[in-house]
Image (cartoon, rainbow, N blue to C red):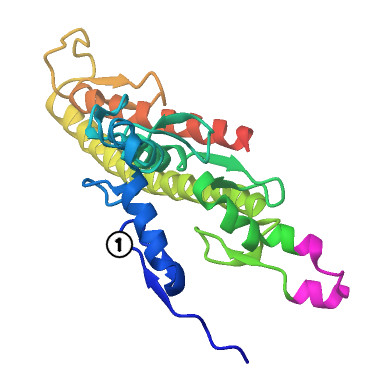
Amino acid sequence: MEKEEATRVCSQCHKEVAEANFDLHETHCSRFLCVCPDCDETVPRDQLNQHKEDQHTVVRCSKCNKKMERRFLMDHESDECVERLQTCQFCMLELPWKELDEHCLACGSRTELCGDCRRYVKLMDKQQHGLNCSAAQDDLTPPQPASSATNKKQTVGCSRCMATFPADVIDEHELKCNAASRWDHEEAQAEEDEKEDNFFRQVTNSQLSNAKAISLSNRPYSSHRGNRGDPNELSTCPHCHLALPVITLRWHQVKCQRYIHLNEQQVNSSEGI
């Protein structure tokens, strides 16, 4: 095995040179080469001024106007300049690097319809959704026996009656459940109004009997009916045709109109269902 030849590093070009040729090489380097005092790079002696002009002249970036030596300009424009143009990964729009993060946050929050599960997914989550999309996985999964598919069928709870139903029929159930709940509420309201009205009729009939008794005892049958100032004078309700004292009739008519209005609403709701 041959012994490795000894080498030395030239102080001019910083290269390793065989020790046998070192003196000759060093003399040549000292005569024709020199080290740039700004960057320690070895350049031909007669090209030193040109080297300084090409590499060390101070220039400005055309985008951000920052000062630097010419040798750094190319790296600055491609990797460091805040005004360098970058492409948005979602809309492919080019915009300055300093605005890219804010733009991508807003642009990536836009939604797009998934062609497999028919759900809207954020653009920033689209790649991850593609890996977890249940509909896409079902397409890639071999068909399973019917009994197994039935057992794994997803169920969803109704927000009104809290019962669980298969996901493919929950929408239809909720429509019926909402209509039934509304009908039950209207029926309960109608029953409550009817009870209140029956109570009102009983009170009114009692008042009517008392009024008749007072009228017969305090005045003759042939008294003038044209006297509107008499509190015991009777008049008929235009809605239910019930004879009541004039004083009672005023608030009875308001109650009677409310009762008729509620009945009309209940009929309209029944026809709509």
Q: Position of residue 89 (x, y in %)?
A: 52, 41
Q: Is residue 171 magenta?
A: no
Q: Height in image: 136 above or below 42? A: below
Q: Height in image: 114 above or below 8? A: above
The answer to which of 125 and 41 lies nearer the viewer is 41
Q: Residue at x 86, y 70 (%)?
A: 142
Q: Is residue 130 left or right of residue 195?
A: right
Q: Is residue 146 magenta?
A: yes
Q: Position of residue 208 (x, y in %)?
A: 26, 34
Q: Main secondary structure of the magenta part?
A: helix
Q: Is residue 77 left or right of residue 178?
A: left
Q: Residues within 10 Å of mark 1 (few under 14, many from 20)?
A: some
Q: Residue at x 58, y 40 (%)?
A: 112
The answer to which of 64 and 55 lies nearer the viewer is 55
Q: Residue at x 61, y 33 (%)?
A: 272
What residue sits right under mark 1 in the picture?
11
The answer to which of 22 and 98 lies nearer the viewer is 22
Q: Is residue 265 left or right of residue 170?
A: left
Note whether residue 105 is visible: yes
Q: Name which quarter of the figure residue 141 lies in.
A: bottom right
Q: Residue furthest top?
A: 226
The answer to which of 35 and 136 lies nearer the viewer is 35
Q: Name which quarter of the figure residue 259 lies in.
A: top left
Q: Position of residue 198 (x, y in %)?
A: 37, 44
Note whether residue 81 is visible: no
Q: Identify the amino acid type marked 1.
A: Ser
Q: Quadrant of the C terminus?
A: top right
Q: Is residue 74 left or right of residue 61?
A: right
Q: Name which quarter of the figure residue 84 lies in.
A: top left
Q: Which residues are magenta?
A: 138-151
Q: Position of residue 10 (x, y in %)?
A: 35, 63
